[in-house]
Every structure is written in C-alpha cells, then in structure tokens.
C-alpha cells in the first residue's frame, strides 16, 4: 500500500464516521455526498477508474439527491 | 430495559463484532495480492480474443454478459417501481417555480452542461477502449440532463425529456440488450456469445457485439436515471416553497 492509498483510506474512514455522527438530516445528505466523493478518489488511487466513474454519479450525486428530496417531502407533510 | 443493561448488552455485542471483524481481517489476502485466477486469465486473453483494450467492459458485456443482462433489468424494474409509485399519486403539477434560486448554481450548471454531455458521450463511445462504458457514460449523460433542471430551466428539462420518449428509450435499451443475445442464438452460438467483426483493438471499430450491448446499456441506464430524476423533481414541485431545503 503506497502512502497515498493509506491516506485516502483514512479520509474515507473519517468521512464514514462523520456521516454516522451527523444528526442534522440536511447536513447528513451533504456529508454522504462528500463520503461518496472520497470513495471516488479511493477507487481512483486503487486503479479502478470504471467503478470510480459510476460511484461519482450514483454515490456523490444520486444518493444525496434522493435523501434531500425525501427530507423536503417529509418536512412538508 | 434500564440504561445499565442496555449498555452491557451493547458492550457484549460490540466486543463480539470487533472480534469477528478482526478474525475476518486477519484472514484477508495481503493488500495488493489478489487471489482470483479468473481476473488474471481474462487480463491475459481478452485483448487478443476480443480486440478490446478495456478488460472491464469485455467482462461485463461479453464474458459475463448474462450477469449484466440481469443488472440491466434490475435497474429497469427499479425505475419502473419509482414511476409506478410516484406517478400514480401525483396529479399534473402546475407549480412553475421549480428548482433552485441561487444564481451561482444556475451559472455553474449552465457552464458544465455541454462539458458533461460531451464527457458522457465520450465515456459511452470509448467504453471498450478506455475506462468507462454504457453504465458509467449513461449515468453521466443522465446527470447532464439533470443539470438542465439545476440550471433553473425546468421547462427546458421537461421539453428535452418528454416522459413517453424516456420510457421508450428505457424499454428499447433493456429490450435491445436481450435481443442482441437472441441474435447470437440465431447465428447458432450460445446466448450473448460475441458475434460480428472484431475489428482493430484500440479503435472505435472493435469488440464485435460488445459495441451493441454497450450502446443498449447506455440508452437504458441514461433513460432510467432521467426517469427516476424526473419523478423526484416532480415530487419536489409539490413541496411548498417555504419548507424547501
């Protein structure tokens, strides 16, 4: 494992912890997007660009978007 | 249950989970020492057998093409489910103040739109040459359409992606994938067996029927994601402005 990979793994772990510890739902949606972005970087440094491309849209954009809409709907109900 | 007993229950389960995880991690192969012989075999044979330079795409659309057929239909069913659940509950929405108000977001959205569109098409077209492929390019294309909405152009977004056309594209994509497999059957080989001229590796004319499966997947994935996105955006339009995020 090269230092860059170790560093990104550490960042992903920290972001994962941050997602779990975030109580405010809107911040949670944004934090999960940051977590997704860090996963993209991890896949990239582990030489899996195909997976990184999918994760970029699905994890960093799609998933937080669905959560954000769900929060908005819940607040209006 | 008292706080004390809950804490002790948590302590016991956390210790058990930690022990199990450590045991599992101890048995993992060393970092970078991949033990799957299948991967090495494919890396060795795919470029010469199929004339493709991206072995990942050769695996998903050829050697494991049948698995991808299942995945394509999982996404198809998921998008169908979203449409069934949300379309039924919603009368035609007339709210025109859709979406974002921030000028910065609108500007960046408009500026990124052509870039994302070209990137998506490039990722799809070169899927069997460089990293990418139908799924990756398809989601990038879908997010390019989503940017139209994010740039504050709700009407343009709906005009660009009329529901009947999106539904049709989704069906043609998923169905087309299955039909390519049937063509292989008609040619006397097994289902989804690669056919067609293999061409020259490293050019757009290579890979045989991988090209067709790649295009079908791109169509299905981009349409499915646009459909899911549209349903959510329409749902968002029902939310009163004050309670938006």
Image (cartoon, grey):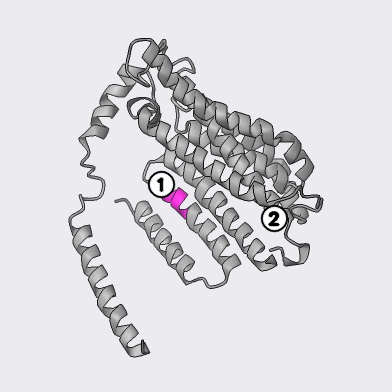
Location of residue B218 with respect to B185 vertically, above or below: below
Q: Chain of mark 2?
A: B
**Residue B93 part of the magenta segment:** no
> Could one spot residue B152 in this view of the protein?
yes
Q: Residue B45: x and y, percent? A: 27, 22
Residue positioned 19% across, 62% down in the render: B23
Front residue (pair B176, B136): B176
From this view, report whether residue B27 is shown above or below residue B68.
Answer: below
Which quarter of the picture shows residue B81?
top right
10 Å neighbourhood of mark 1: few (<14), some, or many (≥20)? many
Q: Magenta segment, principal secondary structure? A: helix
Which residue is at the far front?
A: B88
Please name the residue that numbered disc 1 is placed on.
Answer: A43
Task: Report the side of B23 relative to B236 (left or right).
Answer: left
Query: Residue B197 has which mark?
Result: none
Is the residue marked by circle 2 packed among few (<14), some (14-19), or many (20+) residues within 10 Å? many
Query: Does the magenta portion include A40?
Result: yes
Against B114, is B179 above or below? Answer: above
Secondary structure of the residue carrying tag 2 is helix
**Callouts 2 and 1 in the same chain:** no
Image quadrant where one finds the N terminus of chain B: bottom left
Q: Which residue is mark 2?
A: B236
Magenta-colored span: A38-43
Residue B50 is situated, as x and y percent measured from the top left of the image, at: 35, 18
The chain holding disc 1 is A
Q: Quadrant of the C terminus of chain B?
A: bottom right
- At 76% across and 45% down in the image, what residue appears? B154
Residue A19, percent across and down?
Answer: 48, 65
Residue B34 placed where, x, y %? 23, 42
In this rendered view, identify the residue nearer to me: B107 or B214: B214
Label 1: element kind: helix
Q: CA distance from mark 2 to mark 1?
A: 32 Å
């Amino acid at each position: 494992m090269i230092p860059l990979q170790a560093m990104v793994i550490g960042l992903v772990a920290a972001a994962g912890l941050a997602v779990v510890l975030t109580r405010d739902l809107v911040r949670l949606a944004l934090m999960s997007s940051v977590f997704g972005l860090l996963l993209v970087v991890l896949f990239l440094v582990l030489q899996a660009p195909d997976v990184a491309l999918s994760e970029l849209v699905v994890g960093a954009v799609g998933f937080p978007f669905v959560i954000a809409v769900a929060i908005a709907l819940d607040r209006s109900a | 249950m008292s706080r004390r007993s809950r804490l002790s229950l948590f302590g016991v389960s956390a210790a058990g989970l930690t022990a199990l995880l450590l045991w599992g991690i101890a048995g993992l192969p060393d970092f970078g020492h991949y033990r799957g012989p299948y991967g090495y075999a494919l890396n060795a044979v795919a470029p010469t057998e199929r004339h493709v330079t991206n072995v990942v795409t050769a695996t998903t659309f050829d050697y494991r093409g049948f698995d991808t057929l299942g995945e394509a239909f999982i996404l198809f069913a998921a998008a169908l489910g979203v449409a069934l659940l949300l379309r039924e509950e919603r009368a035609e929405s007339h709210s025109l103040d859709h979406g974002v108000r921030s000028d910065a977001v609108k500007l960046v959205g408009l500026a990124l739109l052509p870039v994302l569109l070209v990137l998506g098409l490039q990722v799809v077209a070169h899927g069997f040459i460089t990293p990418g492929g139908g799924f990756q390019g398809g989601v990038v294309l879908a997010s390019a359409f989503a940017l139209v909405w994010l740039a504050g152009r709700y009407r343009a977004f709906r005009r660009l992606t009329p529901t009947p056309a999106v539904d049709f594209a989704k069906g043609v994509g998923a169905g087309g994938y299955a039909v390519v497999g049937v063509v292989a059957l008609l040619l006397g080989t097994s289902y989804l067996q690669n056919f067609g001229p293999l061409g020259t590796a490293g050019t757009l004319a290579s890979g045989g029927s991988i090209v067709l499966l790649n295009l079908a997947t791109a169509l299905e994935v981009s349409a499915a994601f646009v459909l899911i996105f549209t349903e959510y955006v329409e749902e968002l339009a029902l939310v009163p402005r004050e309670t938006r995020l």
